[in-house]
Amino acid sequence: MTDSRLPVAVLGATGAVGQTFVRLLAGHPWFRLAEVAASDRSAGKRYADATKWIEGVMPDEVRDLIVTTCDPTQVSATIVFSAMDADAAATVEPAFAMAGRFVLSNTKTFRMTDDVPLVIPEVNASHLALLDAQKAKGWSGGVVTNANCAAIAATMALAPLHERFGLTELFIATMQALSGAGYPGVPSLDILGNVIPYIGGDEEGKIEREMQKMLGTVEGARIAQAPFVVSAHANRVPVEHGHTVVMSAKFRQKPSVSEAIAVIRAWKGEIADLNLPSAPREPLVLAEQPDRPQPRRDVNAGNGMTVTVGRVREDAIFHLKLVAMGHNTIRGAAGSAVLNAEALVATGRLGWTPPGRA
Amino acid sequence: MTDSRLPVAVLGATGAVGQTFVRLLAGHPWFRLAEVAASDRSAGKRYADATKWIEGVMPDEVRDLIVTTCDPTQVSATIVFSAMDADAAATVEPAFAMAGRFVLSNTKTFRMTDDVPLVIPEVNASHLALLDAQKAKGWSGGVVTNANCAAIAATMALAPLHERFGLTELFIATMQALSGAGYPGVPSLDILGNVIPYIGGDEEGKIEREMQKMLGTVEGARIAQAPFVVSAHANRVPVEHGHTVVMSAKFRQKPSVSEAIAVIRAWKGEIADLNLPSAPREPLVLAEQPDRPQPRRDVNAGNGMTVTVGRVREDAIFHLKLVAMGHNTIRGAAGSAVLNAEALVATGRLGWTPPGRA
Amino acid sequence: MTDSRLPVAVLGATGAVGQTFVRLLAGHPWFRLAEVAASDRSAGKRYADATKWIEGVMPDEVRDLIVTTCDPTQVSATIVFSAMDADAAATVEPAFAMAGRFVLSNTKTFRMTDDVPLVIPEVNASHLALLDAQKAKGWSGGVVTNANCAAIAATMALAPLHERFGLTELFIATMQALSGAGYPGVPSLDILGNVIPYIGGDEEGKIEREMQKMLGTVEGARIAQAPFVVSAHANRVPVEHGHTVVMSAKFRQKPSVSEAIAVIRAWKGEIADLNLPSAPREPLVLAEQPDRPQPRRDVNAGNGMTVTVGRVREDAIFHLKLVAMGHNTIRGAAGSAVLNAEALVATGRLGWTPPGRA
Amino acid sequence: MTDSRLPVAVLGATGAVGQTFVRLLAGHPWFRLAEVAASDRSAGKRYADATKWIEGVMPDEVRDLIVTTCDPTQVSATIVFSAMDADAAATVEPAFAMAGRFVLSNTKTFRMTDDVPLVIPEVNASHLALLDAQKAKGWSGGVVTNANCAAIAATMALAPLHERFGLTELFIATMQALSGAGYPGVPSLDILGNVIPYIGGDEEGKIEREMQKMLGTVEGARIAQAPFVVSAHANRVPVEHGHTVVMSAKFRQKPSVSEAIAVIRAWKGEIADLNLPSAPREPLVLAEQPDRPQPRRDVNAGNGMTVTVGRVREDAIFHLKLVAMGHNTIRGAAGSAVLNAEALVATGRLGWTPPGRA
């Protein structure tokens, strides 16, 4: 039986995020993981030999793939998922785009670049229109990025409220999981029974800026940042997966708590009609219990693609307080990139129709 | 050799906070723990038999004390530390005050009562003046309370800034330790590798109100709440001791970061001259490293009585962001009550002079 | 469409093990969870109202069931899963057996009773023959128990070795997960960053005796204990699910390490041909990496029904050292009971043929 | 005021064990930490700049020391504590010994070398006699090692029993703390909520052999290993400090449980009369509660130098089961090395008398 799925590649496939791509692509109904690329040190080895697998068991279909270098002449797939280091991505991702490939990148390098969309499909699939603007650089392919993992959870929770009431000011304090720091990441002696009220690499700045871009609007060849201000406090906590964010939000038009709840419940997002394989049945779920969401208990909602919201209540200074929690390596990283790729396909940008779709 | 220390009692001595009182009073230079009182169920037993000791090893001097009931006819000490349940305290604490005893209470019952001071000695020892107003109730003794553990850490960190720049608005998100919930408290299955973004008993409301009272001013027989607004987000994290709070603060007069740091560094508090035995050499310490304070690493600063502050920086919406962390069962509970008792003694309210003081 | 599945009941359905039964029975292909029974305090309430659900999300199909009392006159199912307290089980389980029901019990009460089988189907399904002996008590139904969770993991790992080489002496040290203690179970202040080298209720004795019974042989109306001696050290560790056991084993005939590995790899167990829905594809898996099995990484192998074995190596005193790890609330409790029920059905003891079987 | 203490040095001072040496030597009554040496990469820097301090706050007196290389021409102290890597120690430690220095080494390199004593002073201070044999190599100084951290806790607990009843066979399963792996050591993603039933570097072999040597006897220029056999199972658990070991022990002469308890309680060890500053008042403490020792609760007994024993009971196969727990970086590493140095001084090997001793 021939496999009619589209061959895809993962760049940076041996690292923590790369492994998450591999897990999510194993058994994907549209995509077949055909190529894995990594640093020169790993190139030429079997994937199973080059990789210290972190979570669960390595999928059989990837064990014997030979790792190639991250070079468009060595990788033939049209859809390329990138989990590269930020420095390496600076030259490699454009090279792939120039070579006609679509790079779905989890790397921060181009997130804030004017003509590069920063996409959560349910929130701003419309930003994919920027791919047309990228042609001006001579790219026959393109680069699509996804945001910082904490920014994604917060943005999904606020998207329906922003759309309806117009966010103006936001305080956000995060309690971020260990897997957000990669592997080996945080030493256990630093975090066991502890909290670290600091995350390097300007995590707070990333959250503040990326939320404004994702909720912004396409203006020609760039995104106009949404006109709200964000103040972020980023913290690391001893949790395996799942970033929890607590927020106080102010809007142009003050919503009541019940209006806010109704808007969150009703929200389906921009891609509800596309029926994408990685899209959860509900992108947002509102927890009923007063002490939810909790990372260990809610992180796998919607196979890690659903963001759970809770504790919507009045705020003493702004309008609303609420809590959101999402899986940082799935919805907050690799899963969102895969969903972005599915959106590209479903909106016809590749000129390829997946098996079983008209 | 006679023991010239003042005999004191602990009410609710068998519970988690009661045990912390017992630990802090063992070997105290001024006070001798002479009486332990608890519920009827424990009364009549040896303390060692009535108590499931939680932390470290029970001090020898308390093992053979016979537990009495929480009744002023059964307890003879003038200074009485209360770790009672809120309901029981409602009648017992006034009965002791009526009987001429000074109750240093960690219980929430009377914290917001008009003529009851809510005291961190370094911050508002002056509020002890309300004890005079309590005479109007026929109390020949009095009740002094200390605040919620998270409110104490935040208030200490902000006290120097408020005094100088006038706090007007405050966002605070807490990451609170397990010992704040008492024993048995939080089931391990609820919190291992998890975060609970909710603490019952209106924890957030307590933080919001108690900070306003502690930073308020004495107006006759009551405290005028300080005129700032607080929005609190309370979270439980898998940490043994030490509440971490992240804050965004706005002031009447905007401080620069360096001004704020200088003010925090210079602050000594109201009781610096009293030389109290439980007062730390520095009530506030400013951490130098960007990733501090951390509960596991800084919680025992000043024997648990120092609050560590860090990450003072500009805020995108208000004026300043900062982090504070303090030991919740010592500075945030029993230690503050002991310090309150020492302040009562040192300011002459008991008419008793401790050994070695002029 | 009519539901042709067999209606079953859970006794003690609101507790931690009861909830695991409910999760495993939701969507079961043969059984339909039709009745939930619990203490008088819960009886009459909706299951969703009577239960503090601990893990994940309560299955929809059980939310509106009305809780009944644990009484055969109130419960009509033929197959009854018991997660009752040991005391209550002492009278209730026989009453159900007398009334013609088959009780699959996770409770310790009758585990060591002569004519009650203590079953892991892959290991000793043949012990179900004791159900015939139970007729002598006037029971038209019967009671089948499953063992202590740590004993199950160890017994599965050793079963192939015992069968071939004859176990004579066994040292076993366990590192047991929190969920083995139920809910609320172990207070977080007792176990965060800690180890407790003790588990109450004679855990060590249970492990020692139950292993001997499970690997024993049917002799008429009772089981002759297997003739080996066990020395168990039981410890609690801060792990959510998954009991890890390290063992040193001596046999009548000394196996080489490679012989032991081959025997473990080849083992399929007694029910391989029955094709039971809850039976994992492989009851035992041998981990390849030197640092496995690990509870967090391997606990869900085979949907929690596979025991993972590793580190088979020479022992300096006995013959072999090895490590085994299994899910304590699935394979070690509710999952084994469900598998026992499936074995009863598949071997014709109920005279009922499941949907889709000849 | 002149400081009459003996200047000492730490080799490998920037690493995790090196830092523990620094902490223990800060304020030591006999020794003044005068020199810190480390790799070439750190040499020439201030200690405070060269070191990422892990635990608590760096002592002031060491901050401004300039790091030198690990070379006897660069280091002038007579007493030198070594926390070097095993490879580097192979040449450096003999060079120091040749140069007349006494090296107290925590490194494994020479532990099993014939003429090198492996010492816990309370257990086998008599083995220091091997220093005389080292003269034959032309060493005017010498090398004294301390054992693997888990071996130390087990050996101390068994020493009184071995001395009296003659240990013949021992099963030991360890649950070892994270700090035993150094820093950064174990990645948090590997151990949060997990157990790793494996510790690299032949941890089990080290435990097995080193116990035999420590409980052996001096025979001329070497130690005759004690004639018992050990089977060790080493496990890593999410605990900060404190290795817990569970043991089953067989003796030449079977002790009753009460005899064993009496022997443990009565034991004072070989150096009780020397009154060494780092020696705890009681080297062994027998916990009374059935669920102790526990690492988080007992690890700091005797400032980390006391080993706590518990659960002495009958064993089904051998004679006794028991549990022991000790601080792995203090008693199990740096603290034991400091105590060894104190024993050298107090037994006159340096020809130097500490301040305040006759």
Image (cartoon, coloured by chain):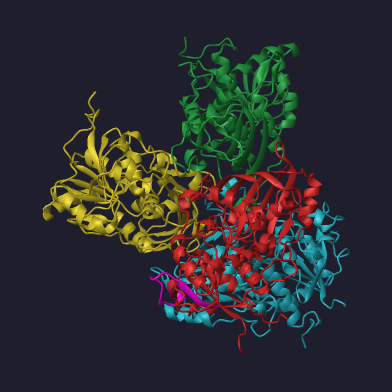
Chain colours: A green, B red, C yellow, D cyan
Q: Percent position (x, y) of residue C235?
A: 46, 60
Q: Percent position (x, y) of residue D248?
A: 46, 68
The question of residue D330 being in magenta is answered with no
Tell me the quadrant of the picture where the C terminus of chain C can be found.
top left
Residue at the spot 39% in from the left edge and 71% down from the top edge: B40
Residue B275, quarter of picture: bottom right
Residue at the spot 48% in from the left edge and 36% down from the top edge: A300
| Left-right relation of A304 to B353 | left
Q: Which residues are magenta?
A: B33-49
Tell me the quadrant of the picture where the N terminus of chain C can be found.
top left
The question of residue B35 being in magenta is answered with yes
Q: How many marks?
A: 0
**Residue D2 or residue B52, whichever sits in front:** B52
Q: Percent position (x, y) of residue D202?
A: 60, 56
Q: Is residue A64 visible?
A: no
Q: Is residue D100 visible?
A: yes
| Left-right relation of B18 to C356 | right
Q: Percent position (x, y) of residue D14?
A: 76, 57
**Residue C48 or residue B88, whichever sits in front:** B88
| Left-right relation of C198 to B5 | left
Q: Is residue C103 above or below residue A24?
A: below
| Left-right relation of B2 to C345 | right
